[in-house]
Every structure is written in C-alpha cells, then in structure tokens.
Image: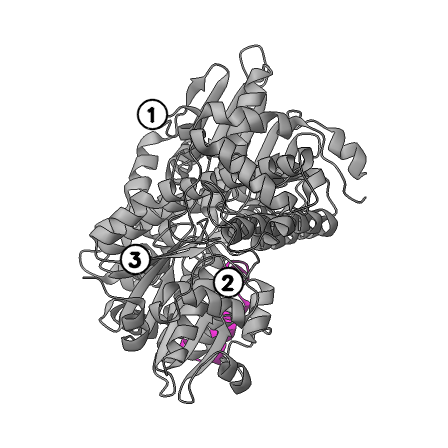
Amino acid sequence: MALAESVRSLLDPRLLIVTGKGGTGKTTVVAALALTAAAHGRRVLVVETGREEHVPRLLAPKSDPVGYAGREVRPGLWAMRVDPYQALAEYLGLQLRMQALVSRIMRNRGFRQLMNASPGWRDLITLGKVWHLEQQRTEKGEPRYDLLLVDAPATGHGLTFLDVPRVVVSALRAGPLRRHAGWVEEMLRDPTATLLLPVALAEELPARETVELVGRIRQGVGVPIDRVVINAVPEPPFPEDLADLDQRLARIPEDRVLAGLPPAPVIATCASHLRSRYELNRRYVGEIARESGLPTLILPFIRGGIRGPDDLDALAGALLAPATGGTP
Amino acid sequence: MSTTPEEIVDGRRIVVCVGCGGVGKTTISASLALAGARRGRRVLVLTIDPAKRLADALGVRSLGNTPRAIPRKLLDRLGVPAEGRLSAMMLDMKRTLDDLVERFAEDAVARDRILENPIYQHASDALSGSAEYSAMEKVFELCEREDLDLIVLDTPPSQHALDFLEAPQRLLEFLDSRLVQLLLHPAFAAGRFGFRLFQRSAHQVLKTLERVSGISFLEDISEFLLAFEGMSEGFRARAGRVQALLFGPESAFVLAAGPADESVADAMTFLDRLEDSGAAVAGVVVNRVRMWPAAAVKLPLESEREAALASLAEALGGEKETGGSARKAAQAALSMLDGYASMVQQDRVATAPLRERAQRRGCFWREVPELPRDVHDLDGIARIASFIFEADAEVAGGG
C-alpha cells in the first residue's frame, strides 16, 4: 500500500493541505511546491490561512498584500489569504442573497462578540471557502484551478482545523450548516482529490508531534495522507571515508600551534558538535519513518536560509522525488 | 540599566515565560525555576505539554494536575540549598476548566448541564481562550499558597502572540455581550428600556443564524450559554484579579525565542505587542544559537589558507602518515569549519534586529548555545541555566 501511494506525484492532487508546527519551514514547502506546480503548467492557487501572508511574501517579495480577493503573483500562480470574517460575509451573502442584511449582521456588535469567542467557526468557514474555490469552474466548464495549495494552521491546531467539519456533522441534527459541513468533510476525505502533507523537522518535538498527527489522522480524522516531509536535514559534516574526523582532530595535542587556525580543541569541539547533531538528526528521521509507518521525503538544509524565489529551486527537485521507506 | 535574570527569580512572585511554539520554552522555564531554587526559593514550574522525556526528568509523568516535588537527593546534586525547593506540574487544561465549572456552577444541576452539553464536550478545548484562561486560573490559585515563593509559568503555545493575555477579556466580553444576554434572557431584555432597538436587530441576527445553521444548533448553543451564565460573576471577579496579578509589579515576562528568521520575526512582534498591552518584558532568551565554542575565533584568510592546510595536515598525519590522506582530512576539517562559520554568521545576522530592539527597551539579553544533545534531564536544564545566569556561567560548547 505504502509503496503504491508514494509513487503518486505531489502535483497530482487537486487539494494539497500542508501542515506543520511553526519553525518547520511549512511556508517554504508551500512556496516551493507552488512554484514547481506552476512551472509544470498547473494553475495553482495558494491559500494562506494565518493572519500573516507568509507564502505570498516569499513568492513575490516587496509587493502589496494579496488579501482575500487574491491576485496572480506570478504567471499561473495565484495567492490569497482567507480572512474568516470576509469568508463569513461571503457565505451569508450566498445563503441569504440580501447584501444589506448581511452588512447589518456583520456590523452588529453583539454578533461580533459572539463570533469572537465562539470556537471552531473560523476553521469551518476557511475550509468552506476552500471547498467553494474547489468548485469553481471556467466558462468551458473546467476547474478554475488545477491545484489548491493550502497552508494550514500549525499542527496542534492543524488537526482541530481538519476535524471541525466532522465534529459539526456529528453535533448537529439537521439544517443547512450540517449539510454544508458534510460537503466539506467529503472533500477532505476524498482520496482521489485530497492529500494532507505534514512537514516535520528531524528534531525531538517536531518528530514526536508529527508521529502523533499521523496517528490521529489515520485513527479518526480520515484525511488522505501518504508521506511525511522532513525539512532542513543537514548533510553529513564530513565525507564518508572520513567519518571519524572529529576523533582524529581531538587527538591533536592541545598545545600544538596551527597556522592561522583556532586552537586544535576548538576545531575538535566544532567537529564533534556537528557530528552529534547530525547523528541526532538521523535518529529522528528514523523515528519518524518507523513510528509513522509512512514513506518520508527528505529536504536538504539550505545554508544561509531561504529569502526569496531563487532559494526555493533547491527544494523543488527534492519535493518531486519519490518518497522512500514506510511500512504498509 | 536592565534588570537581570537573577533579580527576577529572586524578587518576583511570578515569571511568565512567553514565546512561540518550538523554541524550547519549556526548557527555558525549567531552567529559570531551577535557578530560583538554587538561590534558595521555593519554586514551582507550571508547564503545558512538554516533551515527554523532559516531563519524566521533572517527575511530572502523570497528568495529576497537582505539583510534584523534585526529590531532595536530586536537588542536593544540583546545588539547591536546604531552604530551596523545586516542584513541577503539568497542567491538564480540560480538567482545570471542568474544575472551574464545578466551583462556579450554581448547583449540581447546572454543573451537569454544562459538563454534559455536547457543545461543551466538543468545544471546551477549542473554546476561544479557554486553554489560556485555565492556565491563568491555575496560577492564581497557586499564588494563594503559602508554601511557594515563585511560580514560573510556561505559557501554552499559542498561534498568535497575545492570545494568552487577551483570552480572559474575550471570554468576559462574550458572556457580557447583549446578544448572549438576549439568548439567555429574552423576556428580561424585552422589558428593558432602550433595549428595543437593539432587540430588533439582534432578533434579526438570531433568526438569520437559525436559517443558516439549523435550529438545533442554536438550541444547543443557548443551553450551553445558559449553563455558563450562572458562573459568569465568579468568573469575572477572578479574571480581573488574575489580570491585575499578571500585569502587576510581582510579575515579570521573559520572552523565549529561536535564532531562525521566522522565529525572530515572531519574537519581535511578540515583544511589541506585549509592551503595547502593558506587560513589562524583563528579558529575552534566545535558545539554540549556533556559536563558536570559544571567544574570538578567527578563520584563516584566503592568503593564509594554504599554510593553514599544510599545518593542519601535518598535525593530523602525526608521524606515520604523510601526503594525500592527511591533506584530504585537513581539507575536510577546513570545509567543516567554513560550514560552522556560516551557521554562526547566519544566527548572528538573524538575531541582530531582535537584540537591538530588546536592548533598546532595557531587556536583558541572553543567548543559549545549541547543545550537542537534546535536553532530557535536570542536568541538561542546569546546563541551560548556566548560560542565563552569570554565577553559573560557563563557556559554550564542549560536553
């Protein structure tokens, strides 16, 4: 099972939801995928769900915010940010077909206070907007976008995000809201259209959280998932045939003078530090693969950080490679 | 002149460790707490969902929702004097909220109606701000205890900087809102002078909500609110006192950050918004910074590189090995050092704006180096503390 799934390209789904804790580089992965998909001729829409426009800023640095209306930021690549209140107003407008009434409701202070404190609806309305975007067709009847790329909220919250439609369907007895939540749930569970892509780091907490996320998705949330991305995995610090270089450096006598270099113990400490971190990273890569049971996709660590579209190319190739490992 | 971490753990009742998720906030909180205990205070670190192995190390394996004392034997080894104490507690947010309902519900019937309400069951962990509110509530309760001098609070990882501080206010506004009042007491509201205009628009809102959502949803919601309503007085009084305590002179905020671009940007926003809201940020601790293991490390200039290579090859080759293989090893070592230098440089550049802003605001600034291994026990926590507190200072790296 795992093998067949992992062969599927990340450009195949219609709806790709990228999730991961803050600091895992989820934003980078979304941006790299967006660029690659657009380069492969797909019409891509990036949907940002946070308060900040991280992805649009990476794709088109120094340009104006894309906002709720969205914009084509590069050829074939659109980006937007879902503001829950704007999405709610749009939803109410579609339901009631009376714009004046909708404006009155949205301006009502009591209504704002009620909504500010109410749980879950932001997630539901955001996913509802994604569903609505997915339904859009061109005049020729083709999907308006080939790929919807959703930058989901950070993990702990990311799971609640995806589970809200199911909770609503099970908590409500009837009514339009229940029906609409059902449509969203159906979209999220559709294995032919949807894929959830978790982004992890080869470090303790992100590894543990990713394994938990995968477990809970498989147990109940039921969104299709077939691989885990492990981001920023560093290269070995020394060439393969010099794997014990740190130990060799440590054997240089402390007082030995090295021309133009820091003292030998400093060099040895740096080497052993890098080797320890590298081995630790490898261990967590192994842990994620073993305990999630899913194939993994390893992305390289980019020296100097990622500051714009050019730095994303290095990640794009790695993202399209087949994922490896995993147990059925 | 900024305050020091020493002054804070010596003089305050509450230290709130804030910051975005994933920067090692729990570790920083634990090390602040340990430092307090080492300085003779009775300290509790209140943490939320730490890495399991760290929880094991702190002795809070179970979600007991009560403080667990770190054994004396361990404290002795860590240099905690006889009068110093350290305990740890992992907050069970759902249970704290349930406790709150128990305490403030008017009677057993009201209590059960809340606890059994489907909306409460589905939503109590998602109810806006309830997690943050629970944590604050617990701090308040613990502050009333005579046997604690200092509480270090590891705040829940919130997606947005100030969720934690704004949560109680939001909950209160919600309970106060006239729409909620109308849901709760339609008859009362109708009779009240000046309410009629509001009532008409509120009715429209409610009718619309019903139409869009289906009637059963509103029934559940109003039952849920009705049940909560009896609690709101006690709730309000406490929320006010919790706020006063947190923003008062007995508390200090420490901001934990990471050295990556993203997390520096988040920390800057956090710092600004905390100050705007009236919370005084005493200091910033940047965790896992890549730095040189010694002061004033210099790498060879381009023109010195050949000599450096030869000298290192000779040192690596020892007596028996000469020529190609030692030179290859020296080249690998030199390129390793280049890589190390670029990491150090990357973190220095990324953290510079945060450092500048923190220092301009009179916050203390401490950098904790990335350690070769993850921190899983109290010894590791002591090690982290040694980079934050002068008295225990050591040079980065090694070990």
Q: Are labels 3 and 1 on one chain?
A: no
Residue B117 on the magenta segment: yes
A287 or B131, nearer to the observer: A287
Which residue is painted at 33% across and 75% down in the image? B234
**Residue B374 drawn at (x, y percent):** 56, 59
Label 1: chain? Answer: A
Circles 2 and 1: CB atoms closer than 8 Å:
no
When asked about the image quadrant of residue B275, the answer is bottom left
Task: Evaluate whether residue B270 shows in this view.
Answer: yes
- Tell me the residue that label 2 is attached to: B120
Furthest toward the front, the residue is B319
- Tell me the residue that label 3 is attached to: B177
Give the position of the C terminus of chain B as an image quadrant. Answer: bottom right
Give the position of the N terminus of chain B as an image quadrant. Answer: bottom left
Q: Which residues are magenta?
A: B104-123
- Tell me the residue that label 1 is attached to: A62
Placement of A282 over or under B152, stated as above or below = above
Q: CA distance from mark 2 to mark 1?
A: 44 Å
Label 3: chain? Answer: B
> Which amino acid type is marked by label 1?
Lys
Mark 3 closeness class: few <14, some 14–19, many ≥20 residues within 10 Å: some
Q: Is residue B98 left or right of residue B208?
A: right
**Residue B54 drawn at (x, y percent):** 56, 67
Residue B92 on the magenta segment: no
Placement of B258 over or under B338, stated as above or below = below
> Which amino acid type is marked by label 3?
Ser
A107 or B239, nearer to the observer: B239
